[in-house]
Image (spheres, rainbow, N blue to C red):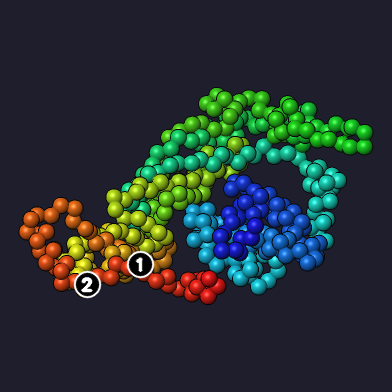
Amino acid sequence: MSATANVKIDYYEVLEVERTVSDTELKAAYRKMALKYHPDRNPGNAEAEERFKACSEAYQVLSDANKRAAYDRFGHAGVGGAGGPGGFNGGSPFGGDAQDLGDIFGDLFGEMFGGGRGGGRATREQRGRDLRYDLKLEFEEAVFGKEQEIKIRRMDLCEDCHGSGAAKGKQPITCPHCGGRGQVRMQQGFFSIARACTSCQGTGTLIVDPCPTCRGESRLQRDHTILVKVPAGVEDGTRIRYGGEGEAGRFGGPSGDLYVVLTVKAHAFFERDGDDLHCSMPVSFPQASLGAELEVPTLEGPSTIKIPEGTQSGKVIKLKGKGVPHLNSSGKGDLLVEVRVQTPTKLTKQQRELLEQLSETMAVDNAPHERGGIFGKVKDIFS
């Protein structure tokens, strides 16, 4: 599973984390994967080396706030080439937070045996949930972009208690059961097991005098209007991320994000392939035989194409720059028009007589065509 292969793997899947992962969780997940697939621990294992490179590439993008935002909005197209060849930027494989392998071992073993981070006080802060909004677009709206206001219902901070959950002039108190740690420990033989405190639900504090407006929840549900800016050239399934526009966090925690997922309706006769458009255009037998200039529809209005004399059915004519704008860059794709020569199914008496006269003047070899290409020739040699 390499993020450097022709088919890009989702960076979050590479590091086996959720899209809502925090910076701290992201770093821990990366260190764990780097330790597992480090070449020093897997000598001669090409697959492990590819996994290690893929993890490094994913971490370089997701650990950078700007690159992560671009990736969350537009996927790999938003960070094209961000990781550099092989997923490295020419420096340490640990990106901007370089540490040697011994430090990784120290972090992991320290957590396993209760060292380092386990003895601090708990925090009441809770990150808000991410929200999703499905926005349907017409084909042309996805091609040219648009702005649209949407309404979402979300949990916002209570204005009366400013998100503390406590009544005016009051403050939460330290949980007497866990001493503010948010955890209680139980001894079982040689092992000490920590569990969330049931009195404070792991927050480390208790609200004795709750806010009468939000009843101690610190948040209230409200309607909110957001202006969605759809850039030109988006595709079906594109997700646009609006950081901090999800539900408000509890007790001072950060807000979640809003993900606007785009669904693009199919066009009546255009089919999209990347930034190119495809369509079929019927022409008559005389037009294909004698050549003609015909008007073809495009998304920007009609254009004229030239049908060369003797055009065969299936010939593709390219209209350069008549396709879809490149996302986040200049230029456009092309419009590819496939010519389809139509055979009339009903003829008048005069048309039939004329075709019969024409047929008598045209010699046609109806024998099957010889097999072409190298594969046919090779087969003949061994037959």
| Percent of width and height locating residue 73 | 49, 54
Q: How many marks?
A: 2
State the separation of the CA atoms marked 2 and 1: 15 Å
Q: Residue at x 50, y 60 (%)?
A: 78
The residue singled out by tag 2 in the image is 363
Q: Residue at x 37, y 44 (%)?
A: 136
Q: Residue at x 78, y 33 (%)?
A: 195
Left or right of 189: which side holds 289?
left
Q: Is residue 271 above or below residue 114?
A: below
Type of amino acid at the residue the image marks with label 2 = Ala
Type of amino acid at the residue the image marks with label 1 = Pro
| Percent of width and height locating residue 222 | 45, 33
The residue singled out by tag 1 in the image is 368
Q: Residue at x 57, y 32 (%)?
A: 218
Circle 1 SS class: loop
Circle 2 SS class: loop
Residue nearest the observer in this picture, 301 or 342:
342
As drawn, the residue found furthest toward the front would be 383
Residue 289 location, quadrant? bottom left
Left or right of 119: which side holds 73?
left
As drawn, the residue found furthest toward the left would be 350
Whether residue 340 can be seen here: yes
Residue nearest the observer in this picture, 228 or 357:
357
Q: Neighbour class for label 1 at 10 Å: few (<14), some, many (≥20)?
A: few
Left or right of 169: which side holds 365?
left
- The circle on residue 306 is none
Residue nearest the observer in this picture, 237 or 162:
237
As drawn, the residue found furthest toward the right would be 189
Which comes sooner in the sequence, label 2 or label 1? 2
